[in-house]
Structures are given as structure tokens and as C-alpha cells.
Amino acid sequence: MIYQNAQLKPIWQRLKACLGGLDQRNARRFKTLLDRLNRLDQRSAAGVKRLAYYASWFNRAVVRGGSKGIVKKRTGSRLGDAFSAVFYRAVSLLDKLDTALWFSGRIYQAKACRVRSQSEKKIANWLTDQEIKFVYEKPLKLGKVLLHPDFYLVESGAYLEYWGLAGANQQYTATMQAKLRLYQEHGVKVISLYPKHLKDKRGLDAVLPDLLAEAKRK
């Protein structure tokens, strides 16, 4: 395997990081890429260059939400500039269609999934970096009410809710309090995060580890 070559190991690790956001529907593309990489000549400098190209291209074009990082490049030729512009527009359009058709409302791409806000993206990425398994918006039926809490933490069995407008919107606050009462009545473990937690200079490291540990003890 190509990643067993010590010279190529850093590039292989970078490639895996680039591909970290792939979902199940991209698994076939991922497998095809792996097959191509495994056929590269490990002793060839051209093979190393090609590997870096694949990593860069996948990072910009294939990973969900990647079109936001693509820019129109000036190549110095009319044909090259035209191709760059067409490629940019095509990928941007596909990204918008992908969001509208399969990820309605989830316009932000975190490392493991799409989410609905920048704040939820920070939380999802933190959980991913800490290797904490979660399910985003897993349905939860409590009596006759069907809820979709922000995050379900698989190992602890707790739910994590981010109350982004708590205190700022009267109707939102009333809904939040009603949901918290419902959780309490049914014995559901809930971890609550608020905007103040994300504004802390130390970030989520300052609060989430203690909150997770407390949830596990319940």
C-alpha cells in the first residue's frame, strides 16, 4: 500500500484529513480514489506530485460544501480561464442543489455532517476532534411529541442542546423551557449549551468536558 512508504506518509495523512468530511454517498468516489492511489509508483516523483494533486482537488471540489473554498483562477490563457470559470460555476451549482435537495436548512458543513448554524458547526467539530460519537438531530419521541435535539451522544446516551437565542427571544425562551420540562418529565439526560459558552476565550474546552462527565454520572 502506498501509505506504508515513509516518504509519502505525511501526504497520505493530509489526504485523509481532506477526506474526513465525506458522507456515505461519496464512499464510491473515495474507494475509486484509493484504488488509483494504490496503483501509483511509490518510487516515482511524478507519483508523489499526482497524489498531492488528488488531495488538493478532492479537498476543494468533492467534500460537501467545498465549493465555498473554490476561487476562479487566472491561468494566463483564454481557454484556461474559461474552463476555470465553468468549473467554478458547476461546482457551486451542484453544492447549492445538494444543500436544497438532501440537506434542507443545513447550510454549514462540519467535519462529520451538515448543520444549521456556525455555532452548531463549532460544537460538531469539537465532538469530532474529541472522538465523541454523535448523531445530529436524531428523532426523539416523548409521549405524543416528536423532537429533534441538536446532538445525541451515543456513548453516554445523553442529548446536547444548543440554546442560541435563550433570553434574546421571548417565544424561543418559552419553547426552550417547555422542552426542558418535557425532558425532565421523561428522565432524558440533557446537556445545555448557551452562547456564553462559545464566547469564552478558552472555547468549549472550558465547559464541555465537565458537562459530559456529569451526564455520564447520571
Image (cartoon, rainbow, N blue to C red):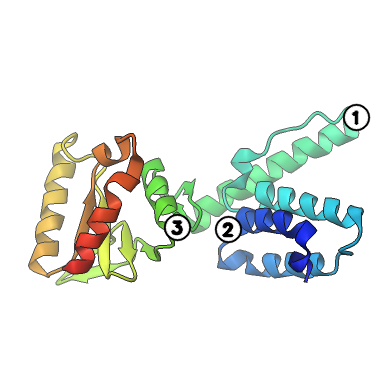
For mark 2, what is the residue? Answer: 20
Label 2 or label 3, whichever comes before in sequence order = 2
Q: Residue at x 26, y 62 (%)?
A: 159
Decide: is 167 above or below 188. Answer: above
For mark 1, what is the residue? Answer: 77
Which corner quadrant holds the N terminus? bottom right
Q: Is residue 149 left or right of residue 168?
A: right
Q: Residue at x 37, y 50 (%)?
A: 123
Q: Residues within 10 Å of mark 1 (few under 14, many from 20)?
A: few
**Which numbered marker is on residue 128?**
3
Q: In this view of the protein, can residue 124 be seen by the observer?
A: yes
Looking at the rendered structure, the kind of residue marked 2 is: Gly
Q: Residue at x 76, y 61 (%)?
A: 6
Looking at the rendered structure, the kind of residue marked 3 is: Thr
The location of residue 87, given as percent across then percent down, is 75, 43
Q: Residues within 10 Å of mark 2 (few under 14, many from 20)?
A: some
Q: Nearer the viewer, residue 64 or 134?
A: 134
Q: In this view of the protein, can residue 104 be seen by the observer?
A: no
